[in-house]
Amino acid sequence: MAKKKLKQHVINRNWCKGCGICVSVCPKKVLELDELDKALAARPEACITCKLCEKICPDLAIIVETEEVDEEAKPHE
Amino acid sequence: MSVHDFIRERFFPHMWCAGCGHGTILNGLIRAVDELGIRKRNLVMVTGIGCSARISGYVDFHSLHTIHGRALAFATGVKLSRPELHVIVPMGDGDGLSIGGNHFIHAARRNINLTALIMNNRTYGMTGGQFSPLSGLGIKASTAPYDNIDNSFDVVELAKAAGATFVARTTTFHVNQLSDLIKAAIQHKGFSVVEIFTQCPTYFGRKNKLGDAPQMLQTFKERTVPVGSPKKQEDPSLIERGIFVNIERPEYCDEYQKLLERTQEA
Ligand code: SF4
Ligand code: SF4
Ligand code: SF4
C-alpha cells in the first residue's frame, strides 16, 4: 500500500508574518521561528505530514509537500 | 488544484494582522471548495464591510464587496437571478448581526439557498475594537473600557429560531471541522449558517488580556466541546461545536420558479 512521506515544507517567507501559530499547533515540534520571525522547518525528519500547520496558517504561507512511498520497499514500517 | 489557484496572489501578503483568524477561515474555505470540485466561475462571494469583509478581495471567484450589513441583501439578488451559482456570504459579527441583523433573520426565514459564514471575533476590528452584539457581558472594548453590560446573541439559537435549515459552529483551531462544515453548508439546499469563532489578537485579545494568537487558539480548544459531549453537562459554560440543525424545507428560489411556472400557464 502506498503511504505519504514528507518531501518538503514550502514556506513563503514573504507572506509569513511570524504569528507562531504553526509552531504552537505542530504535534511533533517540527517548526520554529527564525531570527527574522519567519517559520522554519527545523526538524523535518519528525514531521508526520498531518498538514495541521498548512491548514491553520492564516497567511497561506506553508505547503507541506508529500510523496508516495511504497511500503513493500520499506520492510520495517 | 492548489490553494494558490483560488486566490488573487497579487494582493498577498494580505492586510490582516499577524495571527488574525480570518486568514485561517480563508484557508478552510478554499480547501472546502477545492474538495467539492466547484469551478471558480460558479462561485460568488458577497461581503459587507469590516476586516472580515476583505475576504472577498482575496478569492479568485466572482466577488462583490458591498455595503455595511447588507451583504445578504445583495446575495439574495444574485441568487434569485442566477440560482445555479453557489453564493457564499462571509460576515463579521458586527456586520452580520448588528448592522445586518435584520437581513440575517429574514434570509433565514425565507430559507434562500445561501451559505452564510459568521466570522465571530466578538469585536469591530477595522474601526478600533468597539464591542459588537456578540462581545458578551464583562468584555472590555474601546467603547466599554470598564465592562460591557450588553448581553450577546447566541448565533446558533438565533439562526435556528429565524428558520435557517443548516446551522453549525466551529472555531479557527478546529481546521478539519472548519472545512468539513463549510463543505456541508455549501452542499445544503437552503439557508445555511456556520458560526466560526476567530481570533482578533490586535483588539479583542489585547483589550481582554487573552494573550497572543496561539494562546487565543488554545482557549478555543479548551472552551469548546463536540455537540452532545457529556463534558457539557459537567461544565455548562463550555460551548458546543458541530451541526445543530440540518433539515429540509421548501427553498425560496425553487418556490419562486414554481410560482412563475404556475402563473405563466394560467
Ligand atoms: S502560521 Fe503561517 S504566518 Fe504564522 S508563523 Fe507559521 S507560517 Fe508564518
Ligand atoms: S505537517 Fe504536521 S507534523 Fe508536519 S510540520 Fe506540519 S503540523 Fe508538524
Ligand atoms: S484588527 Fe483584528 S480582525 Fe482586523 S485584521 Fe487585525 S486581528 Fe484581524
Image (tube, grey):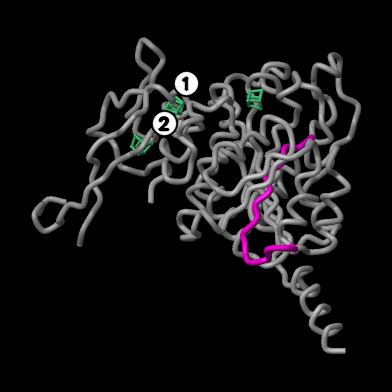
Front-lying residue, A40 or B233: A40
Which amino acid type corresponds to the residue marked 2 in the rendered image? Answer: Ala
Q: Circle 1: is it few (<14), some (14-19), or many (20+) Cα within 10 Å?
A: many
In reply to whether residue B90 is colored magenta, the answer given is yes
- Mark 1 and 2 residues: CB-CB less than 8 Å, in contact? yes
Looking at the picture, how far across and down is residue B113, in whole percent?
71, 63
The answer to which quarter of the image holds residue B238 is top right
Q: Residue at x 55, y 34 (%)?
A: B23
**Disc 2: which chain?**
A
Looking at the picture, how far across and down is residue A12, in whole percent?
37, 27
Above or below residue B265? Residue B152 is: above
**Disc 1: which chain?**
A
Give the Cα separation between the discs numbered 1 and 2. 9 Å
Q: Residue at x 46, y 57 (%)?
A: B35
Above or below residue B167? Residue B176 is: above
First to last magenta residue range: B80-94
Q: Residue at x 49, y 38 (%)?
A: B8
Check residue A17 in the rendering and tell me which mark sits there, or answer none.
1
Mark 1 vs ligand 1: CB under 8 Å?
Answer: yes
Question: For the residue labelled by badge 2, is the local secondary structure a helix, a strand or a loop?
Answer: loop
Q: Which residue is mark 2?
A: A61
